[in-house]
Image: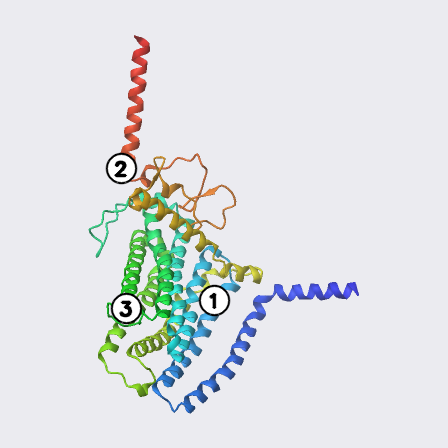
Amino acid sequence: MSTSTSDAAEGTRMILRGWRYWIRPIVVLLYAAILLVALPLLVVDLVQDKAKPLTLAWFIAGIFVIVTIPISLWTILHHLIYFTQPELQKPIMRILWMVPIYAIDCWFAIKFPKLAIYFDTVRECYEAYVIYSFMVYLLNYLTREYELAGTLGNKPQRKHIFPFCCLPPWPMGGIFIQTCKRGVLQYTLIRPVTTIIALICELTNVYHEGDFSPRYAWLYIMIINNMSQIWAMYCLVLFYMATKEELKPISPVGKFVCVKMVVFASFWQGVAIAIVAEVVPLNKKWGWDTPQEFATGLQDLLICFEMFIAAVAHHYTFSYQPFVIVGHNIPWYRSIRSMFDVSDVRNDVTDHVKQVGNSVREARPPWKWRSNGISREVNEKTSLLLSPSSSDGEANVLGHQRSSNDFVSPEVLAPEEQNSDLKLKLEHCDLKVEKNSDSEN
């Protein structure tokens, strides 16, 4: 009896070890079963509703969703199977999940226009998560291949570009890295907060999505989200411009375009549709009750179509092929657990909130934050750039191991900090000279 039990347990373990061989056919069969149920329901719903524009939009969007999801899931599945570089593939898979989440979310929002704001809440929060994950991906690659702060510190000063060309330049090195990172993180924090405020306003009937009237909350929340998103994307662009030579091996242009177009273009597309909906008269026979519902439905329909294009683009720009290592095997639960682990996001957002609080109390811009004469940006510990291969020592924001006694190179300090340190050294030398002259007398 014990022998048969042990044999069965060993057989189970063998099956689980070979999960990468049987997981693909199982996923294909499951999706085929879902299609056999979903497609007839779509057709029946279209026929019963006599192909009204709302139902027709739901049907067309459903076709695109049905085609889009397997493309994205296939790419994600292969990243799980060949999960050989967690520090790069973890943020990649977060970005890849954007397509199925957007597609399914918009599809249900078309079917239930009264609940669209609640579905869109999920999409908007994930949008901020995607921008954050892309920044993580770039930083993890750069800090693995380079001593990033030193590399940037040796480069000429990067000036700001339009529309922020009047801002003072950020010191190159660790301060530049941290300022760009925090510019992205603020959107990760602000977007969920404004989304919660929008939900509260909707429940109290003061939101009115798509209504540009200053009496309602949508206009103000839209402006706040727009400003926060522009700043996040600007910091991402500035960081890319400063590191584009180092990023060439991973072909960043296509990846950057994919993220920027989906996130940034979809926002302005929604604003443009809202303006058109206010001008074009609404026919109640279409199935929407208000111009705002029509604008939201049209936006969701376009996003379902655009997600099909995004899924194909992601399949090539965020391909699993560079990570394929023959013979490399990793337990299935470890890949899945790593994909859904969000502890790094929690740590970074918490750290960002603390630093914002410190900067408000000190009334200083982020690039002038200090702690005991050394930039706080250099000494703080953050999970965003924590190398997964690090096993001991303190991991700093520059992505490499450093003990507490290591010397901080001058290029990561702001010019005023370097001058103040030089003055302290000169004063110290003057005191020594005076003491020596007094002892001789």
Q: Which residue in the protein does label 1 denote?
A: 76
Q: Tell me the kind of residue under disc 2.
A: Glu
Q: Residue at x 28, y 62 (%)?
A: 226
Gap between marks 3 and 1 measured at Cα: 41 Å
Q: Residue at x 40, y 71 (%)?
A: 118
Determine the secondary structure under disc 2: helix
Tell which of 233 and 356 is nearer to you.
356
Query: Residue at the top extreme?
Result: 441
The numbered mark at residue 416 is: 2
Query: Which-is-in-front pick, marks 1 and 2?
Result: 2
Callout 1 environment at 10 Å: few (<14), some (14 to 19), or many (20+)?
A: many
Tell which of 40 and 290 is nearer to you.
290
Q: Which residue in the protein does label 3 denote?
A: 216
Gap between marks 1 and 2 measured at Cα: 47 Å
Q: Tell me the kind of residue under disc 1.
A: Ile
Query: Which-is-in-front pick, marks 3 and 1?
Result: 3
Pointer 1 or 2: first along the chain: 1
Q: As drawn, is 380 to the left or to the right of 279?
A: right
Contact (Cβ within 8 Å) of mark 3 with mark 1? no
Residue 187, percent across and down?
34, 58
Residue 310, percent across and down?
37, 70
Pointer 3 or 1: first along the chain: 1
The numbered mark at residue 12 is: none
Query: Which-is-in-front pick, marks 2 and 3?
Result: 3
